[in-house]
Amino acid sequence: MQEKVYLDSTIPSYYFDQRESLRTFYEITRRWWLEMSNAYEIFISDAVLQELNAGNYPRKKEIMEFAMRIPLLTETQDLEQISEFYVENYVMPSSLLGDATHLAYASYYDIQYLLTWNCNHLANANKRKHIRVINGRLGLSTPEIVTPLELFAEVV
């Protein structure tokens, strides 16, 4: 049985990004997708599609087509309550409800990895303990929140 990965919106958007300042990120994202994505069961949520659709991307059509091929996790009322609990308990600022929602999906659906380039509010070692404590209070598992760099196969 394959482990599960939830992609936040940074992964599809960086896959198609061509800004020179983000070259390393999009190259790693593409390499991870080509080399590793088949090793996992990949999911997104409607929240990812909404963020991508609201964004101003030069290759938006391609990004949306890419993302829409990825299986969607079902939205439930519980997810909204979990996201709000994260904000109330300072896991995420209220202005970043999208990040709270991504974490809620990955936690609620017992996804092993939340894959993101958001190192400020998600893939941040300083937040991991707090996230585990809050998810423990909610009775939820806590995904490993990682960047594509951290989810390549080990080379022996």
Image (spheres, rainbow, N blue to C red):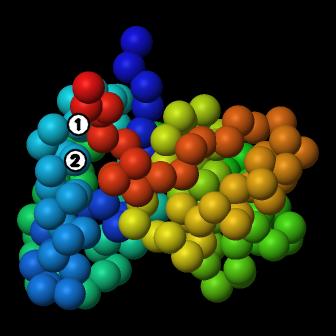
Residue 64 appears in the picture as rendered:
no
**Residue at 53% of width from left, 35% of height from top?**
111
Label 2 neighbour load within 10 Å: few <14, some 14-19, many 20+: many
Left or right of 2 on screen, residue 85: right
Q: Residue furthest top?
A: 1
Task: Where is residue 127? Give x, y as percent.
Answer: 70, 64
**Residue at 50% of width from left, 70% of height from top?**
119
Amino acid identity at mark 2: Trp
**Residue at 9% of width from left, 65% of height from top?**
62
Disc on res. 36: 1
Left or right of 73 on screen, residue 91: right
Q: Quadrant of residue 81?
A: bottom right
In this orientation, which residue lies closer to the viewer: 49 or 153? Answer: 153
Task: Where is residue 134? Give x, y as percent.
Answer: 83, 53
Indicate the quadrant containing the N terminus: top left, top right, bottom left or bottom right: top left
Image height of 133 relative to 83, above or below: above
Task: Where is residue 56? Give x, y as percent.
Answer: 25, 87
* Mark 2 residue element: helix
Q: Which residue is mark 2?
A: 32
Image height of 16 relative to 133, above or below: below
In space, the residues marked 1 and 2 are separated at their CA atoms by 5 Å
* Mark 1 residue element: helix
Callout 1 touching callout 2 (CB < 8 Å): yes
In this orientation, which residue lies closer to the viewer: 130 or 149? Answer: 149
Amino acid identity at mark 1: Met
In this orientation, which residue lies closer to the viewer: 127 or 56? Answer: 127
